[in-house]
Image (cartoon, grey):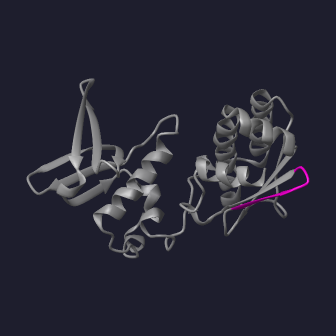
Amino acid sequence: MDFKTMLQLPVLDTNAVLKIVQEIADIERKEDRPRMPKVSISTHSGSASGFFVNHDAEKKVVLLCDIYDRDAQFQYIEVNSISSISLSNINKYGYLLSDGKIPFVPSADEIPTVLQLKKDIKALELEVKAVLEKEISIVYIHEGTPEDLDKFYALKIVSLLKETLSSIAADNLAKEAFSESISTINFNLGSENKSSLEKDVLSITVDTSKGLKSFPKAKELQTQIEKQL
């Protein structure tokens, strides 16, 4: 993020910042080499710093951790005691702090080729067949050749579908209803999150209007799908 981009950021309260940092952490923890947000927190009686792990909104506690000489250190901080938060190690997530005003730009190594995207979709079809015991065709619907950003989002949707369909397969009733009702999944990018079922074709639209921030969570997508069954 450059200086001019930073000037577009709005003022956020600490609760909003914690929600965004939690979102970043949830994205990163799924990566092979997660780059968790680094956080410095000032409280009414002191300060704490480390890598953000989790925020429990119900317990109103933030967990930070760090490792020094292979010795893990953990800090649990009450949200009500926080007076300020400093963030680093989140350069590529600046768009989340802007609520959609700053465009999301993935790094070059995060953008798949069309061939790689097809391979990943095929791999997902094989995984789905293994857990659902039925062949399901998965199709990315688009016009012309997808732009780099579209390919990036499509790959993220493949991961989202993998998580969602695994959850459905783990529930015997949902698995049976899904297998009986659906033989094809079409997905596309759009400006709202919605699902529809026509005959045996499930169509899924994923909202990319605010980048990954507007993506549904796997549980939300599962609920959308199950309403169609």
Task: Tell me the residue at 46%/63% (across/down).
Answer: 96
Can I make out residue 12 in this image?
Answer: yes
- Pinpoint residue 120: horizontal percent, then vertical percent: 74, 39
Work out whether residue 3 or residue 62 is closer to the camera in this orientation and state it.
Answer: 62
| The N terminus: image quadrant | bottom left
Tell me where residue 64 sits by quadrant: top left
Viewed as shown, does residue 111 lie left or right of 125? left
- Pinpoint residue 190: horizontal percent, then vertical percent: 71, 66
Viewed as shown, does residue 63 lie left or right of 220? left
Task: Tell me the residue at 47%/70% (across/down).
Answer: 99
Viewed as shown, does residue 102 lie left or right of 88? right
Query: Which SS type dominates the magenta stretch?
Result: strand
Work out whether residue 176 or residue 87 is closer to the camera in this orientation and state it.
Answer: 176
Tell me where residue 125 sits by quadrant: top right
**Is 172 rendered above or below residue 214?**
above
Work out whether residue 156 or residue 203 is closer to the camera in this orientation and state it.
Answer: 203
Magenta stretch, residue numbers: 194-200
- Pinpoint residue 59: horizontal percent, then vertical percent: 30, 47
Task: Tell me the residue at 85%/63% (across/down).
Answer: 144
- Count the marks: 0
Task: Tell me the residue at 8%/53% (across/down).
Answer: 45
Viewed as shown, does residue 116 lie left or right of 96? right
- Pinpoint residue 98: horizontal percent, then vertical percent: 44, 70
Magenta stretch holds residue 155 = no
